Image (spheres, grey):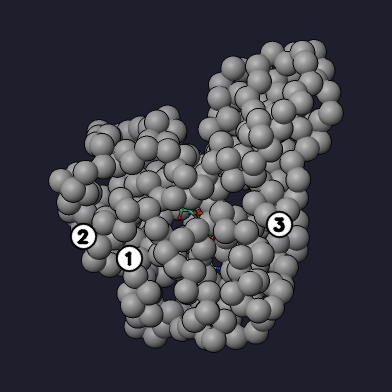
Amino acid sequence: MIAEIVTRVLPANPEATQTAARILAAGGLVAFPTETVYGLGADAANGTAVARLYAAKGRPSFNPLIAHVASLSTARALACFDDAAERLAKLWPGPLTLVLPKASGCQVTELATAGLDTIALRVPSHPVAHDLLTAFGGPVVAPSANRSGHVSPTTAQHVLADLNGRVDLILDGGPSAVGLESTIVACLGGAPTLLRPGGLPRQAIERVLGTKLIDATASASDAGDAETPIAPGMLVSHYAPHARLRLEAAAVSPGEALLAFGGAEPPGASATRNLSQSGDLVEAAANLFAHLRALDATGVSVIAVMPIPHEGLGEAINDRLARAAAPRM
Ligand code: TXA
Ligand code: MG
């Protein structure tokens, strides 16, 4: 059990952002918008604050956190950038996280990196996140602002539904534009490795690198336990609604809800949400988590999901759907 606290929700404006920075500096927890999903932030250098963050999420403590910074220059003090990392850092700010060797003197607490000698870093592009990180002045660790194992939040209301009474402040900056978590790439001296597909499509990263990414997602996700050191957070059943998901559905069975994609919706669903009528994968990504939550909230026991193409952001959308459909652990 953790002690209940009063959770405030404030529209993101300069005054609220200053308040949020003060709460972080005092060891508190602040949920804030990023362009991918909402994050639950704590002072990365404060072990007690990070411990509170794990407790608020109900997160297994072996699962390390992403440190968010306002700029590349702040990131350089925390990690070692090889040539590939230098090239990929040009994609910042944006929906990309780099896993790099920790720099000596990196002030991020061991608890946040789960004892690894690597660190995950991200410079988000959302103006509220940027202003908060600038006002705070140091790294802020932030997992997605949901209870562990729940669907990632793309609005302040989603955060409140999961974490009311467990966080000090939620900055409301409207819906997240990308709607999927960041793409995670490890640059640890060898060839850059894709640890998690996400809001920045693989092709955009490979264009900047001039080479193909090595794929670690399959090996990382089928183990799903602490013995998978490279991407310890890639638990198979992770983005889980209460309802069971039936993927690649061409038709709807009686009683099922429908998560549709494209113009041709099969009839007969108890409730329907369409990720993108026009078949636009960017729009689908932005809608994914909110639509899953909305269908789940109808209390239906099965959500039929129409096929989604695998190109571009479709890779990350299909990854999240496969996790949401996996048997619960
Ligand atoms: O878009 C995002 O990435 C959001 C926003 C808030 O930034 N954050 C997010 O954090 O999705 P989280 O904690 O839900 O997912 C971070 C993933 C986890 O799977 C974790 O295991 C992995 O990053 N990770 C963190 N540090 C790592 C490291 N040093 N090596 C490998 N994987 C790491
Ligand atoms: Mg998460």
Q: Amino acid at mark 3?
A: Ser
Label 2 sits on a secondary structure element that is helix
Q: What residue does disc 3 label?
A: 221
Q: What residue does disc 2 label?
A: 135
Q: Amino acid at mark 2?
A: Ala
Is disc 2 surrounded by few (<14), some (14 to 19) or many (20+) residues within 10 Å? some
Disc on res. 62: none
- Identify the residue at horizontal 82%, vertical 18% (top origin): 253
Looking at the rendered image, the disc whose residue lies closer to the viewer, 1 or 3, is: 1
Label 1 sits on a secondary structure element that is loop
User: Label 1 to label 2, Cα distance in Å?
Assistant: 9 Å
| Label 1 or label 2, whichever comes before in sequence order | 1
Q: Amino acid at mark 1?
A: Ala
User: Label 2 to label 3, Cα distance in Å?
Assistant: 36 Å
Give percent across and percent down for residue 275. 63, 33
Ligand 1 within 8 Å of the CB at mark 1: no
Is disc 1 surrounded by few (<14), some (14 to 19) or many (20+) residues within 10 Å? many
| Label 1 or label 3, whichever comes before in sequence order | 1
Q: What residue does disc 1 label?
A: 70
